């Protein structure tokens, strides 16, 4: 991109005027476009979307390199908890830097890793007793599904290993191949189908026919699952679900009876229940964990995204003692979980996570998140009544506003309109996602909802 394209980029309405798009921004964008490859980004279209260069962040906002301020309406893609630049988390990371930057967790241990395991388990459903660290959500899911398979191969009483996973259409568990194998979003996953593990997939409990109740839909998918398990249950090592909200699938919500029903089927057919709380965990649904709404303890539970408050990459698999026990035995028996990463349990990440959890407890962040969720429901009432809106789906703070399609990228156009008004949100197709930092205050929440409403009215007429 040449300097000549400064300011006025692409068709349609310019986002910012020539006057405010600085040389620094123009230059950074040009350098980015020359060498950088971004995740989930359609690079042929992106230059015309006027890439936004983030310069700094504080609280609920970030600023671009031209000094424009944006409200972070999606928690920097579902991560931020207390906001950006939280003094307590900053300080915890700094203190950790002064003591220990990193040490391998392969055969060594350290205090932040030990303490975080204790703290996490103290928040988790009773029965989860072990923590295995990973780096991001995908790698936690990858570890969990490998654990489930190996645990089936090494279960007491023996029997052949169970090679299949049972999972749900419209599910999303990350982008590594194992995680993609248990996913169910055509747009993201179909390309890789020839490479993937063999699995069995049921329909989504979040996709209902007109007039069908969530409970009826849950029962329908559970009986689909039962039929598969009756036919091939001996071959299924784990059932993998996102509890209550299939987030990347478009904030598809389902009835809690689905989650408890999966627990019963897993017990009946001897499969492990793997619950992926990477998006729903750490308070997003208005409870610490989505499974807390359902009274269910899974066998393996993943978390990530909000774990470090949105600061650093860290995820974890929480496991029941029975699963862990399947990996015990003399070293010569090779029952070990031969899996790990260079940066497993990085102490800086653990320190950020510990500070995040301590603040969540002190500030009753989960209870606050529940109130934020209720407020979102109130503030979005007038949006829901608007003709251009098909449906609003929400559990706690996790919100999807499905707009009527009026062109190629309607959801995206709404988000660009919001950006012009100083609010940053990112869509999933024609679903405009709102997922504010849990600690958001009422004024910012009103701004978020007001701007999104105005943007929908502007684009969807
Ligand atoms: C985002 C997400 C993942 C993947 O996490 P990454 O940190 O992006 O690898 C896995 N599962 C769910 C439910 C997610 O929303």
Image (cartoon, rainbow, N blue to C red):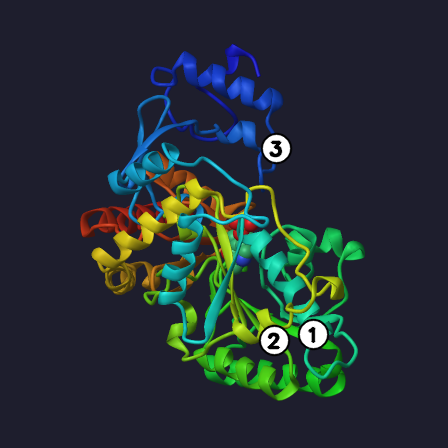
Label whose residue precedes the other's in the sequence (1 or 3) = 3
> Would you say residue 192 is visible in this rendering?
yes
Determine which residue is flagged by label 2.
272
Label whose residue precedes the other's in the sequence (2 or 3) = 3
Distance CA(mark 2)–CA(mark 3) = 40 Å
Q: Nearer the viewer, mark 1 or mark 2?
A: 1
Q: Are marks 1 and 2 in contact (CB under 8 Å)?
A: yes
For residue 447, above or below residue 220: above
* Residue 35 x/y as whole percent: 61, 22
Q: Quadrant of residue 59?
A: top left
Q: Quadrant of residue 339?
A: bottom right
For residue 130, above or below residue 346: below
Q: Which mark is residue 43?
A: 3
Distance CA(mark 1)–CA(mark 3) = 43 Å
Q: Nearer the viewer, residue 248 or 260?
A: 260
Q: Residues within 10 Å of mark 3 (few under 14, many from 20)?
A: few
Q: Is 298 left or right of 325, judged from the image as shown?
A: left
Q: Nearer the viewer, mark 1 or mark 3?
A: 1
Q: Element type at marker 3?
A: loop
């Amino acid at each position: 991109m040449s300097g000549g394209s400064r300011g006025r980029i692409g068709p349609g309405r310019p986002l910012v005027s020539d006057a405010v798009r600085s040389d620094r921004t123009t230059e950074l964008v040009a350098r980015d476009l020359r060498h950088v490859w971004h995740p989930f980004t359609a690079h042929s279209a992106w230059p015309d979307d006027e890439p936004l260069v983030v310069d700094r962040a504080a609280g609920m906002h970030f600023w671009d390199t031209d000094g424009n301020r944006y409200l972070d309406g999606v928690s920097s893609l579902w991560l931020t908890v207390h906001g950006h630049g939280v003094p307590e988390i900053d300080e915890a990371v700094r203190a950790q830097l002064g003591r220990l930057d990193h040490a391998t967790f392969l055969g060594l241990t350290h205090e932040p890793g030990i303490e975080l395991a204790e703290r996490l388990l103290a928040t988790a459903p009773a029965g989860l007793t072990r923590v295995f660290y990973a780096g991001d959500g995908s790698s936690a899911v990858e570890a969990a599904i490998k654990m489930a398979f190996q645990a089936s191969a090494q279960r007491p009483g023996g029997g052949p290993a169970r090679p299949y996973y049972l999972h749900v259409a419209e599910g999303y568990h990350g982008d590594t191949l194992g995680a993609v194998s248990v996913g169910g979003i055509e747009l993201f996953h179909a390309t890789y189908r020839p490479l993937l593990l063999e699995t069995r997939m049921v329909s989504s409990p979040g996709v209902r026919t007109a007039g069908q109740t969530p409970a009826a839909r849950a029962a329908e998918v559970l009986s689909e699952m039962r039929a598969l398990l009756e036919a091939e249950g001996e071959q299924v090592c784990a059932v993998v679900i996102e509890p209550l909200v299939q987030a990347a699938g478009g904030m598809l919500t389902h009835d809690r009876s689905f989650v408890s029903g999966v627990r019963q089927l897993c017990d009946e057919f001897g499969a492990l229940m793997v619950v992926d709380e990477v998006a729903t965990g750490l308070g997003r649904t208005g409870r610490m964990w989505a499974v807390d709404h359902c009274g269910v303890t899974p066998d393996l539970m993943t978390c990530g995204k909000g774990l470090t408050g949105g600061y650093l990459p860290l995820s974890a698999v929480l496991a029941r003692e029975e699963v862990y026990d399947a990996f015990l035995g003399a070293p010569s028996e090779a029952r070990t979980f031969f899996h790990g990463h260079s940066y497993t349990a990085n102490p800086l990440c653990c320190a950020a996570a510990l500070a995040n959890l301590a603040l969540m407890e002190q500030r009753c962040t989960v209870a606050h998140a529940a109130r934020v969720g209720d407020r979102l429901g109130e503030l979005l009432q007038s949006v829901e009544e608007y003709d251009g809106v098909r449906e609003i789906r929400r559990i706690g703070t996790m919100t999807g506003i499905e707009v009527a399609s009026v062109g190629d990228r309607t959801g995206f156009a709404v988000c660009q309109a919001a950006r012009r008004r100083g609010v940053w949100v990112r869509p999933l197709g024609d679903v405009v996602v709102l997922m504010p930092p849990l600690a958001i205050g009422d004024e910012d929440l009103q701004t978020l909802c007001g701007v999104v409403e105005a943007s929908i009215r502007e684009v969807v007429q």
